[in-house]
């Protein structure tokens, strides 16, 4: 518990995994440097040379400064400070004694430190810079010979003792470091496994909740479809009792509008995806049902379809179904006369970049040229109103017959 608190100085729960690991590693190495510097005082019991009080004090205070920087949240600055100050301390220690005492061995645990500090989420340049600092310090300690830093009280016997002492201390520092690092990594691994387990449990709850909502939504679609089917049935009964052909046609049109909406919900109920439908199959089925609802000319009219396979959400599928319903109904009611030998209706749908174009064409008499045709035709006015709902542009034109063309964003 105490070790965990010491290593977790400055580690916040909102930090990402590698930031936490870096902060903990730097804290761990700073504590090792601090304790190692304190333990190094024991060398006075083995040699007669003057003890390097200044460099030992520098190592202690810089280790504490690194811990303070991490505690305050300056993690990147703490990492650089640790590497630079440690390299400086080891360089001065190497200069104070001869190379034979092995003080340069303290550079190697530092290399191990930087390898563990490496954060894969950050640029590799930082790790290269840290290794460059260590390499320059190591080479400088070998190539430079600064007399002002030399400890002149060291004897040959002291050098022999220092070599043994430094080898043993470096060995134990490395062993302790590896042990603590492995322990820390295991702890972090257990934390990651715990978080993964919580995430998996949360995913199960979300999946279960989603499944329940999908079931509920499917049931809603089913009930909406059934309710619309009841309305369609009532309109069928009313159609049979219509007093005249005009009333009967009005009832058929109303029934077809309800039917076009009901077919959307029916297709959604039959699918795993409860938000989108296959527009090609829906429009093809809708056109066939509309033609059947006008038995007078249905056997004579040829239906041509050029439909691309497109998936579309329900918020646009319903208005589009109603638009196509009105366009087809308009052709069935008004386009063809007895003089028309080969009556046909064509419906085309294609995807053009990020927009969908739907055209309903017939080879009938076309639209009237009067300027108020939209005002006197409920179906055409309804098409314009529905197009506004889906941000569609609509064009009514004569092209060897009537043509209704709409273009809307996917």
Image: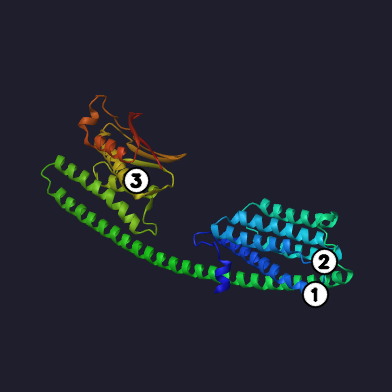
Q: Earlier in the sequence, mark 1 or mark 3?
A: 1
Whole-number angstrom distance, CA of label 2 to CA of label 3: 79 Å
Q: In which quarter of the image is the C terminus?
A: top left
Q: Nearer the viewer, residue 41 or 322?
A: 41
Q: Is residue 300 visible?
A: no
Q: Nearer the viewer, residue 157 or 126?
A: 157
Mark 3 crowd level (few <14, some 14–19, many ≥20, 10 Å Cα):
some
Tag 2–tag 1 contact (CB < 8 Å): no
Whole-number angstrom distance, CA of label 1 to CA of label 3: 88 Å
Residue projecting furthest to the left:
243
The residue labelled by disc 2 is: 102
Above or below, 73 relative to 49:
above
Q: Where is residue 142 in the image (x, y as percent from the top left)?
A: 84, 57
The residue labelled by disc 1 is: 46
The residue labelled by disc 3 is: 316
Q: In which quarter of the image is the N terminus?
A: bottom right
Q: Is residue 361 left or right of residue 84?
A: left
Q: Is residue 12 left or right of residue 58?
A: left
Mark 1 or 3: the one toward you? 1
Question: Which residue is located at x 10 percent, y 44 percent?
Answer: 243
Question: Which residue is located at x 67 percent, y 69 percent?
Answer: 35
Disc number for residue 65: none
Mark 1 crowd level (few <14, some 14–19, many ≥20, 10 Å Cα):
few
Above or below, 301 relative to 178:
above
Q: Nearer the viewer, residue 194 or 278?
A: 194
Question: Which residue is located at x 77 percent, y 67 percent?
Answer: 51
Above or below, 311 relative to 42:
above
């Amino acid at each position: 518990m105490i070790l965990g608190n010491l290593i977790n100085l400055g580690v916040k729960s909102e930090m990402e995994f590698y930031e936490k690991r870096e902060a903990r590693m730097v804290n761990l190495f700073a504590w090792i440097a601090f304790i190692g510097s304190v333990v190094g005082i024991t060398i006075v019991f083995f040699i007669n040379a003057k003890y390097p009080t200044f460099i030992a004090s520098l190592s202690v205070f810089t280790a504490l400064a690194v811990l303070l920087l991490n505690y305050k949240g300056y993690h990147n600055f703490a990492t650089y400070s640790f590497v630079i100050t440690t390299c400086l301390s080891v360089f001065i220690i190497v200069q104070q004694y001869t190379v034979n005492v092995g003080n340069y061995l303290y550079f190697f645990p530092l290399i191990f430190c930087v390898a563990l500090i490496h954060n894969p989420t950050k640029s590799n340049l930082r790790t290269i810079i840290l290794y460059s600092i260590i390499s320059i310090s190591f080479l400088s300690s070998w190539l430079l010979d600064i007399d002002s830093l030399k400890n002149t009280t060291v004897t040959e016997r002291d050098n022999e003792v220092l070599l043994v002492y430094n080898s043993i201390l470096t060995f134990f520092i490395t062993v302790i470091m590896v042990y603590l690092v492995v322990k820390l990594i295991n702890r972090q691994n257990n934390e990651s496994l715990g978080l993964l387990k919580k995430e998996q449990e949360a995913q199960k709850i979300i999946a279960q909740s989603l499944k329940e909502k999908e079931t509920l939504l499917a049931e809603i679609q089913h009930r909406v479809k059934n309710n619309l089917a009841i309305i369609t049935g009532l309109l069928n009964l009313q159609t049979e009792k219509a007093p005249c052909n005009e009333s009967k046609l009005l009832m058929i049109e109303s029934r077809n509008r309800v039917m076009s909406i009901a077919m959307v919900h029916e297709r959604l109920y039959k699918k795993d995806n409860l938000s989108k439908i296959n527009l090609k199959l829906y429009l093809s089925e809708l056109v066939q049902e509309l033609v059947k609802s006008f038995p007078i000319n249905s056997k004579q009219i040829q239906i041509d379809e050029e439909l691309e396979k497109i998936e579309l959400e329900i918020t646009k599928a319903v208005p589009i179904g109603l638009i196509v319903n009105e366009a087809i109904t308009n052709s069935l009611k008004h386009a063809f006369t007895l003089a028309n030998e080969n009556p046909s209706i064509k419906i085309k749908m294609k995807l053009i970049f990020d927009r969908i174009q739907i055209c309903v064409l017939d080879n009938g008499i076309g639209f009237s040229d009067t300027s108020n045709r939209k005002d006197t035709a409920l179906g055409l006015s309804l098409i314009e109103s529905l197009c506004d709902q889906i941000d569609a542009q609509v064009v009514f034109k004569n092209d060897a017959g009537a043509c209704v063309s709409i273009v809307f964003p996917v």
